[in-house]
Amino acid sequence: MTARLREVYLVDAVRTPVGKYGGALAGTRPDDLAAHALRALLDRTPDLDPARIDDVVLGNANGAGEENRDVARMAVLLAGLPVSVPGATVNRLCASGLEAVVQAARAVAVGDASIVVAGGVESMSRAPWVLPKPERAFPAGNQELFSSTLGWRMVNPRMRPEWTVALGEGAELIADKYGITREQQDAYALASHRKAARAWSEGLLDGETVPVPGVDLARDETIRDNTSLESLGALRPVFRKEGGTVTAGNSSPLNDGAAALLVTDEEGLAATGREPLARVSASAVTGIEPQYFGLGPVEAVTKALRKAGRGFGDLTTVELNEAFAAQVLGCLTQWPDLDPDLVNPRGGAIAVGHPLGASGARITAAAAHQLAAAGSGTAVATACIGVGQGLALVLER
């Protein structure tokens, strides 16, 4: 006999303002960023005894620096939670924070947990250089350092060359595939900045952002209020010098940040004394040719909506992580029934930023708060993933 799955609720969600590479959050360790998000989340629910938390699951895409040795558990200790609260760190690259939410929801749904904190953290500013050990002892020559900030490194030579192209070249391939022009990408990027700037000026993000103590950062640091099509058009392509369309202006930047969400069942919800933001309905993960990683959300969203018994016409809002404008526009061509105006209404990662391990948690938080503001509806949070995957989560209220 199959046991009935429990309802899963997102009770609350917070995130830090996102810092730019080498910017306001560069002096803050990632384990401290994660601890702050965790502590700020729980401080907003004073009725909840932290000892009741069954687990803390955080996404992180690096793991090679100060966030080594399970940053989720480190965050638990640094946040002053009881030592009885465990923690686990998960890595699905750009969707790590979203993967953390999915794993937390799954644990709650099957009855393994009643209350879980999920989220993610990344400090791309503080990502270390990595020095591999030499094949032989006492090498006489120089050794190569690898940056762990972003992308492929120490690639296995057995990997097919087309799979290991740079992330930006993958965006160029999507632009080629669907005939997406430089002008379309720049126009999309401009809209992302304008929506993000408007959301901050109208106070729409006040309920989900928590400032980092001792840091002068009142809002996301990479939003450019005064950018224009002219200034975006003046930027040179980064990945293809001849005929390229992907620039720094129509790509997400490198960033630092953290996010945390409170995930419960009915019993856990009662312990919080709060009304939930949203309910978790379904999730799906899919794979795709690695060089077309940016199209990963296409099938993942379609599959997740099918599992939830919903269609594109039922959606209230969509949070699609903006790794590149070309990637977003490529996905949209494959969802003809989706109203593009529903996508990232408060700006996306091109403007807000993309701290890898935190982004999936950030977009889930954004979708949940937007549903709460609307009062009812269906939302999707989804992200493309390097090495060719897509992950999607359906929320309802």
Image (cartoon, helix red, strand yellow):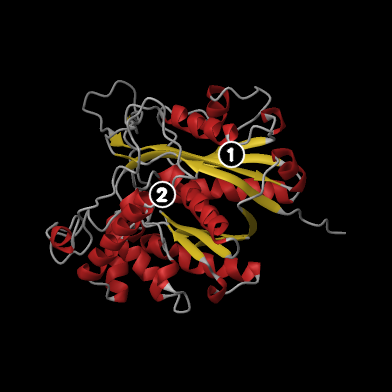
**Measured from the top left, where is residue 90 in percent x and y?**
54, 41
Identify residue type, mark 2.
Gly
Distance in Å between CA atoms under marks 2 and 1: 29 Å
Which quarter shows the C terminus? bottom right
| Mark 1 residue type | Val
Give the residue at mark 1.
Answer: 57
**Is 117 in front, or is 292?**
117
Q: Position of residue 393 (x, y in %)?
A: 56, 58
Q: Secondary structure at mark 2?
A: loop
Q: Is residue 219 above or below residue 173?
A: above
* Placement of 85 over or under 368, stated as above or below: above
Q: Residue at x 35, y 46 (%)?
A: 155
Please tell me whether residue 232 is drawn above or below residue 136 in the rendered image: below
Quadrant hosting residue 310: bottom right
Residue 233 seen? yes
Precedes in sequence: disc 2 or disc 1: 1
Which residue does the numbered mark 2 point to in the structure image?
203
- For the point 77% across and 44% down, which residue is it? 267
The residue positioned farthest toward the bottom in the image shown: 336
- Between 82 and 165, the one lying in front of the other is 82
Q: Residue at x 34, y 27 (%)?
A: 136
Question: Residue 163 sits in which quadrant?
Answer: bottom left
Q: Nearer the viewer, mark 2 or mark 1?
A: 2
Side of 375 relative to 242 (left or right): right
Q: Neighbour class for label 1 at 10 Å: few (<14), some, many (≥20)?
A: many
Image coordinates for residue 34, horizontal then vertical, percent: 48, 33
Relative depth, front residue between 44 and 344 = 44
Are there few (<14), some (14-19), or many (20+) residues within 10 Å of tag 2?
few
Q: Quadrant of the N terminus?
A: bottom right
Quadrant location of residue 122? top left
